Image (spheres, helix red, strand yellow):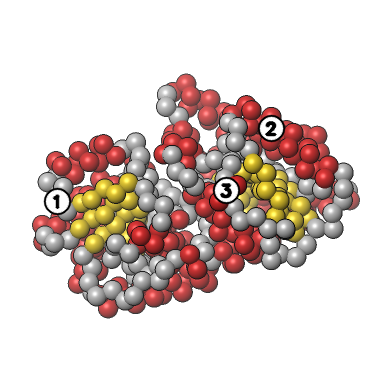
């Protein structure tokens, strides 16, 4: 094993559940890595190695080692384990950082068993919701529950997106709060084209998976109220998912087919945000929504459900508007407010962009992640000294 002067971090992120399920080129978790990579290279004393399925989308540089793993399930676990052994012999690994709570963590646990390298597991959303999304029956749900417990029990530290996930780890899995690092998702400011000041609000938009947790029926009910008063308003829905047929049926039943367009997934976010005047996120649960960060960075006024993840990003009435996810009437009132208060909408979108730059930019989040790596290494060194 070659001892490097730099601290060696190995990030493992082969394929998110949503990318596999909906045939996306790059899922939300992969997008986060793409946002952070340019800033990893600027960190002195740190060497990053990436194990991923998406090498074609990763910019190759001299400072970043990238390994491709295209195999799934058992083959992925074994291939990743032996690859970690190979990497470790070449340059000692100091931290393993799986970026999805799933089979990604298993080879890290296997490697830890032999070399005691600390594992920092990223959890991007509500754990209960994660299990329910993946499980198709009571039998598989029970297996997934036990599997998740195993992964959490055998991880040393946790990287979470919001306080709700932190609380869940402490209350449901008895995790020491000092082992949890709250680090938000990031947005590449340069990747978002900042929209000119809006002159009217006619087109509302939703961007994301069409699933129960996204609470789209509430959005449709609110839009129905709005369209009765403002017949020319439009709702643009970008995404697909298991609830797509039922949502389309509901749109037809509510006689909104002329006012609502389902676009499916578009990979180019610039195209999406150029088509809407206001972004709406009605979800019951989120990690930190990439779409919300993109909309705010692009200068789109936002309305979102009042849940912990969205409250972390939005300051109500300052950088956006919040509403109770169970109240379609409150959402309709917020939408109507933006239609009738263009000046306020422009003030909020300007504040939102600045807020994202200061707290959620790739540069800021990379520094937070590096601080968590340093903290873990210090703790490990103290343990070795004992």
Q: Nearer the viewer, mark 3 or mark 2?
A: 3
Give the image location of residue 157, x and y in percent: 67, 47
Closer to us: 62 or 131: 62
Circles 3 and 1 in contact, beta carbons < 8 Å = no
Crowd tier of the residue under label 1, counting other residues whose Cα lies within 10 Å: few below 14, some 14–19, many 20 or above: few
Q: Earlier in the sequence, mark 1 or mark 2?
A: 2
Kindly report the distance in space between the C-alpha atoms of the residues bearing marks 3 and 2. 19 Å
Kindly report the distance in space between the C-alpha atoms of the residues bearing marks 3 and 1. 40 Å
Q: Which mark is residue 258?
A: 1
The answer to whether any part of residue 353 appears in the image is yes
Q: Residue at x 40, y 58 (%)?
A: 269
Q: Residue at x 48, y 24 (%)?
A: 140
Q: Quadrant of the N terminus?
A: top right
Q: Residue at x 20, y 51 (%)?
A: 260
Closer to us: 296 or 165: 296
Please give left or right for residue 23 compared with residue 51 in the image: left
Please give left or right for residue 62 compared with residue 332 in the image: right
Crowd tier of the residue under label 3, counting other residues whose Cα lies within 10 Å: few below 14, some 14–19, many 20 or above: few
Kindly report the distance in space between the C-alpha atoms of the residues bearing marks 1 and 2. 51 Å
Q: Secondary structure at mark 2?
A: helix
Give the image location of residue 149, x and y in percent: 59, 33
Q: Which mark is residue 79?
A: 2
Please give left or right for residue 322 compared with residue 249 in the image: right
Q: Which mark is residue 56?
A: 3
């Amino acid at each position: 094993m070659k001892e490097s002067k730099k601290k060696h971090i190995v990030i493992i992120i082969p394929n998110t559940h949503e990318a596999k399920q909906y045939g996306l080129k790059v899922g939300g978790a992969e997008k986060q890595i793409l946002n952070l990579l340019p800033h990893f290279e600027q960190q002195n004393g740190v060497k990053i190695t990436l194990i991923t399925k998406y090498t074609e989308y990763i910019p190759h540089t001299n400072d970043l080692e990238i390994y491709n793993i295209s195999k799934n399930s058992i083959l992925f676990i074994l291939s990743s384990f032996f690859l970690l052994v190979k990497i470790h012999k070449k340059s000692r690994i100091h931290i393993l950082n799986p970026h999805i709570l799933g089979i990604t963590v298993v080879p890290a646990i296997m490697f830890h068993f032999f070399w005691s390298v600390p594992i920092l597991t990223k959890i991007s959303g509500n754990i209960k919701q994660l299990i329910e999304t993946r499980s198709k029956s009571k039998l598989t749900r029970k297996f997934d529950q036990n599997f998740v417990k195993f992964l959490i029990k055998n991880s040393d530290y946790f990287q979470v997106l919001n306080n709700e996930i932190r609380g869940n780890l402490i209350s449901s899995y008895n995790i020491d709060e000092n082992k949890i690092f709250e680090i938000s998702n990031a947005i590449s400011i340069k990747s978002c084209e900042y929209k000119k000041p809006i002159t009217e609000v006619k087109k509302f938009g939703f961007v994301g998976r069409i699933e129960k947790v996204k609470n789209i029926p509430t959005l449709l009910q609110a839009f129905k109220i709005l369209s009765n008063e403002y017949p020319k308003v439009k709702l643009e829905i970008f995404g697909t998912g298991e609830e797509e047929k039922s949502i389309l049926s509901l749109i037809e039943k509510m006689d909104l087919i002329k006012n609502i367009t389902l676009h499916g997934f578009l990979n180019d976010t610039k195209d999406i945000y150029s088509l809407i005047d206001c972004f709406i996120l009605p979800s019951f649960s989120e990690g930190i929504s990439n779409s919300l960060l993109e909309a705010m960075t692009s200068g789109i006024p936002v309305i979102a459900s009042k849940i912990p993840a969205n409250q972390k990003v939005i300051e109500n009435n300052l950088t956006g508007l919040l509403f109770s996810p169970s109240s379609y009437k409150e959402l309709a009132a917020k939408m109507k407010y933006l239609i009738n208060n263009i000046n306020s909408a422009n003030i909020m979108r300007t504040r939102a962009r600045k807020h994202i730059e200061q707290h959620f930019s790739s540069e800021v989040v990379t520094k937070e992640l590096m601080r968590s790596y340093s903290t873990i290494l210090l703790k490990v060194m103290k343990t070795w000294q004992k």
